[in-house]
Image (cartoon, rainbow, N blue to C red):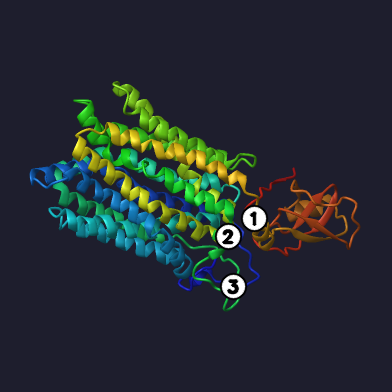
Amino acid sequence: MTTASGDAESRASPSTPMTPPDGGVRAWMVLAASFLCNGLLFGIINTYGVIYVYLLKDLETAKVPDAASKASLVGSLCIGTTFLISPVAGVLTDRWGIRLTTAVGGVLASSGMLFSSFVTQNVYALYGTYGVLFGVGASLTYTPSLVVLGHYFRRYLGVANGLVAAGSSVFSVLLPYPLEWLLQRFGFSGSLLLLAAMMSLIIGCSMLFKPLAPPTPAPGRTELFNVDIWKRRKYVIWALAIPTALFGYFVPYVHMVKYVSTRFEGEDGKILILFIGLASGVGRLVFGRIADVPRVDRIFLQQISFFCIGVATMLLTVTDSFAVMKVLALVMGLFDGCFISLLGPIAFQLCGQRGATQAIGCLLGLCSVPLTVGPFIAGLLFDHLGSYRLPFLLAGVPPVICSMLMFAVRCVPDDAKEDAAESDDLMVKSAQLQPAADKCANGSALKAHAGGGSAGASPGTWIRLQGLQGLQGLLVEERLCVRVALLAAPRSPGRRHSYSQLA
């Protein structure tokens, strides 16, 4: 991954490898800042259903035609723009650097909320301020906040992504009732001013996003767009299948509160949004940890999550029990957490570290259309039918279809040409056996499980070892002590390797 000139502190000599520390004070501070960024942004996006009710009431009072679809379009434009700009955010992250891109995103997100507070009576102006401007700022913040985790975590990347993704869940749980209190106390305009102040915290978080120094590319070889990711057939199938599910994904977040008010008189729909957020946070942590288990199939986990989300969404239309609605909301949230927490790890797995930034950005860009269109169509159907039964039923179909389409990822072979270009095979030269004390002093006595070593090699011969990119120091393989010479490019995304420290 190319680091922009804007991050002068990230420059290093071409020989300096990027070795994620997988912990330490700096790494956990970065993770906390990413957590806050994601929480602020998606907490507000996910609780738009609370704002939607107030905006819809204002539009209906003003006798605006198709009020439900117009009010829902404000929120769906916001999340749609967030994902639409993601490919650009990926490129800007490579060009400007993680820190500067995040700071610019914070400024735009805060400005979007600030400007929205002055145009609350004009829904068309809100399309531009709340929908587009805030969405652009959210996108420029979200993409680098995921990418920076790859600089500080490798072995625990799934857990790190799960923790950061849980930020949106935590804020989705905490915000609905305070947000309604703000709307009742200060009105729509005053509430947006306070939200603008909250968004400015992102600028401070960006100061912590100092990337570790990767190798500096050779002059003239820097590419604005990484076209190599589109040569990876597994990624192409995965990136085209995911958007299919999202035509119905955001419908409950926008329309759930209103749906409950029309279906279950006297019940509070905000509690379902709270349940979705709470379960989603648990899912992100649990499945983020599961994703780090070497033999776990991350893509299959995502398939299961989409299937369960789709079925649960459709079941919302057939139950007459609000208690069952709560259970279904918990199921939706749990598997929503699974889906979200696996996006980053799967992108790194399929496209490698160098391609992950734009792989995530392009995927989110493809997701923008269904995320924008889905809630709008649901609102349009409600305007004409006066019921949410059909919109919610239709919203559950795309995730189920996506879960089936993703089986195609297994039907194509690994991208051998690209894997060879980014091979992480190492050539190491064997050395004389050293006393155990020397090995302990170096602190890097490891046993490789990736295979390829030769126990019978004599000193001075070259041994081919696979899957140990970034390992420098002493390697113990069947009592043969060798000094590792790193001669390879970043690790191949198609393979899983593991190694454990010897006692």
- Point out the residue furthest to the left here: 62
Task: Please identify the quarter of the rendering in which residue 144 is found.
Answer: bottom left
As measured in the structure, the alpha-carbon distance from the residue carrying label 1 to the one carrying label 2 is: 8 Å
In terms of sequence position, does the residue under pointer 2 or pointer 3 come before the other?
Answer: 3
Amino acid type, mark 3: Pro
Q: Nearer the viewer, residue 472 or 386?
A: 386
Q: Can residue 284 be seen in the rendering of this structure? A: no
Write the residue at 23% across / 59% down: 128
Horizontal relation, residue 252 to residue 239: left or right: left
Comparing labels 3 and 1, the label whose residue is closer to the camera: 1
Looking at the image, residue 28 lies above or below residue 280: below
Amino acid type, mark 2: Lys
Amino acid type, mark 1: Asp
Looking at the image, residue 73 lies above or below residue 300: below
> Where does residue 60 sit, x and y in percent of width and height?
11, 43
Q: Can residue 369 be seen in the rendering of this structure? A: yes
Q: What residue does disc 3 label? A: 217
Q: What residue does disc 2 label? A: 231
Q: What residue does disc 1 label? A: 415
